[in-house]
Image (cartoon, grey):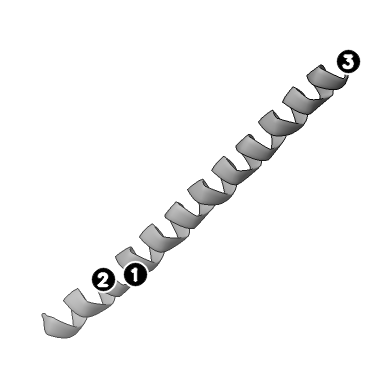
Amino acid sequence: MVIWEYLHLRVDVHSGTRTQYRSLQMNSAMAFGTSYLYYSEYYV
């Protein structure tokens, strides 16, 4: 019983960090895309 709760907690933490990492990746990609559009408009 205790081992099952421990494993469940580890899975929750792992999925939480993965979700945070994915959202961080999306935010950085969106920032990069926005800056790229801005520079392309500026130079063209």
Give the CA separation, mark 3 to mark 2.
54 Å
Q: Check disc 3 and report its element: helix, strand or loop.
A: loop
Label ID, residue 17: none
Q: Is residue 12 above or below residue 32?
A: above
Q: Is residue 26 left or right of residue 43?
A: right
Residue 14: where, in percent of width, then height?
Answer: 62, 36
Q: Is residue 9 left or right of residue 18?
A: right
Which residue: 26% across, 71% down?
37
Which amino acid type is shown beneath numbered disc 1? Answer: Thr
Q: Earlier in the sequence, mark 3 or mark 2?
A: 3
Q: Is residue 37 left or right of residue 14?
A: left
Q: Quadrant of residue 3?
A: top right
Residue bearing mark 3: 1
Which amino acid type is shown beneath numbered disc 3? Answer: Met
Give the CA separation, mark 1 to mark 3.
50 Å
Front: mark 1 or 3: 3
Q: Quadrant of residue 2?
A: top right
Q: Is residue 39 above or below residue 4?
A: below
Residue 7: where, in percent of width, then height?
Answer: 73, 24
Which residue: 62% across, 36% down?
15
Which residue: 11% across, 80% down?
44
- Residue placed farthest to the bottom in the image? 42
- Residue placed farthest to the left in the image? 44
Mark 1 neighbour density, 10 Å: few (under 14) some (14–19) many (20 or more): few
Residue bearing mark 2: 37
Mark 3 neighbour density, 10 Å: few (under 14) some (14–19) many (20 or more): few
Say which of 9 and 39 sits in front: 9
Front: mark 3 or 2: 3
Residue bearing mark 1: 34
Which residue: 49% across, 56% down?
24
